[in-house]
Image (cartoon, helix red, strand yellow):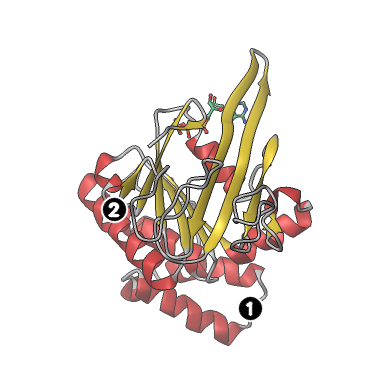
Amino acid sequence: MTVGAGTGAGTGASAGPDGVRTRSRGGAVALRAHGVSRVFGTGAGEVHALVDVSVEVAAGELVVVVGPSGSGKSTLLHVLGGLDRPTSGQVWLDPAPGAGADGQGVGPDPGPGRELSAMTEDELHAVRREEIGFVFQSFGLVPVLSAAENVEVPLRLARTGAADRARRVAAALAAVGLAEHAEQRPYELSGGQQQRVGIARALVAQPRVLLADEPTGQLDSATAVVVMDLVRELVHSRGVAAVVTTHDPELVARADRVLVLRDGRLAPA
Ligand SMILES: Nc1ncnc2c1ncn2[C@@H]1O[C@H](COP(=O)(O)OP(=O)(O)OP(=O)(O)O)[C@@H](O)[C@H]1O
């Protein structure tokens, strides 16, 4: 685990000259933010929720974001996942390695990667549906649907064929240890089981990126550790680039790298 992440003491990590928080595992960069700021206008004035945040996340890397309440963790996740747009700065999926404007892969131009922050709403919808999995603190399951039907939702949205859907839902439920619970509705499952359904749903469409906002916030600490271990195992085995926010120090130990946000800024390592 690398804490602070500026210097990246893990495998294959390095700090770019522009202070980009580089990856700590060896996979290719899957997600990259450069100089991202987000300002909210409120009745009381401007809130600078994110200030000049730069970060890279590699395929197969689990990055955990910590920080006090209001430090910008959820805002960062929303901007990384295309649920919100930065006021300034850019977010890219699949930035090309070594294609930066300065020839070292660290400039503001990432080469032929796809800039999330410049996409139309329709393009963003498609990318969020097909390439980004979201996990929520409150699970976000549809109460009248079974576990299998909840997991199936992203595949229906992607118009995946019925036979393929059935196969992939069964595999996703098996991957989170819920093969025996496919027909149960959320209220018939424990909190940990419900969140495992949420994780299966997030991963069933085989996204490149997984974003989880306090995924264990409603779970007791023993269950939280089991769920986080599952997330870690799936992220590593499937090569997904994952960013997870948490307040729970126990979960931080599961991270490949920890980012600390304070007042919207990444704290130095
Ligand atoms: N839609 C919004 N409009 C105005 N201000 C907002 C909005 N969303 C977030 N903020 C403000 O931006 C700052 C960062 O909020 P954010 O939710 O990202 O923090 P957080 O670290 O996730 O907090 P918590 O740990 O309590 O969930 C806070 O001051 C918050 O009040």
Relative horizontal placement of residue 255, taking residue 49 as reference (left or right): left
| Residue ranking furthest to the top | 44
Q: Between 21 and 138, which is closer to the camera in this rendering?
A: 21
> Disc 2 designates what residue?
254
Residue 110 appears in view: yes
Residue 182 seen from this side: no
Callout 1: helix, strand or loop?
loop
Q: Where 208 sits versus 264, above or below?
A: below
Q: Which of marks 1 and 2 is nearer the N terminus?
A: 1
Tell me if residue 149 comes above or below residue 262 in the rendering. below
Depth check, mark 1 against mark 2: the one in front is: 2
238 left or right of 216 in image? right
Q: Residue 141 carries which label?
A: none
Quadrant of res 104: bottom right
**Residue type indicated by callout 1:** Thr
Rounded to the nearest angstrom, the CA distance separating label 1 from label 2 is 34 Å
Whole-percent x and y of residue 7? 40, 45
Q: Is mark 2 on a helix, strand or loop?
A: loop
- The residue under label 2 is which amino acid type? Arg
Front residue of 138/182: it is: 138
Question: Looking at this view, is 163 or 242 the one in front?
Answer: 242
- Residue, disc 1: 160
> Along the line of sight, which residue is nearer the eye, 93 or 133?
93
Residue extending furthest left?
222
**Residue 179 image point, x, y percent:** 34, 76
User: Mark 1 Cα within 10 Å, few/some/many (few <14, many 20+)?
Assistant: some
Q: Find residue 78 and report its horizontal and vertical position in percent.
A: 58, 44
Reply above or below: 259 against 140: above
Q: Which residue is found at the position 46% from the left and 56% from the top?
A: 242
Q: Where is residue 269 in the image (x, y as percent from the top left)?
A: 37, 37
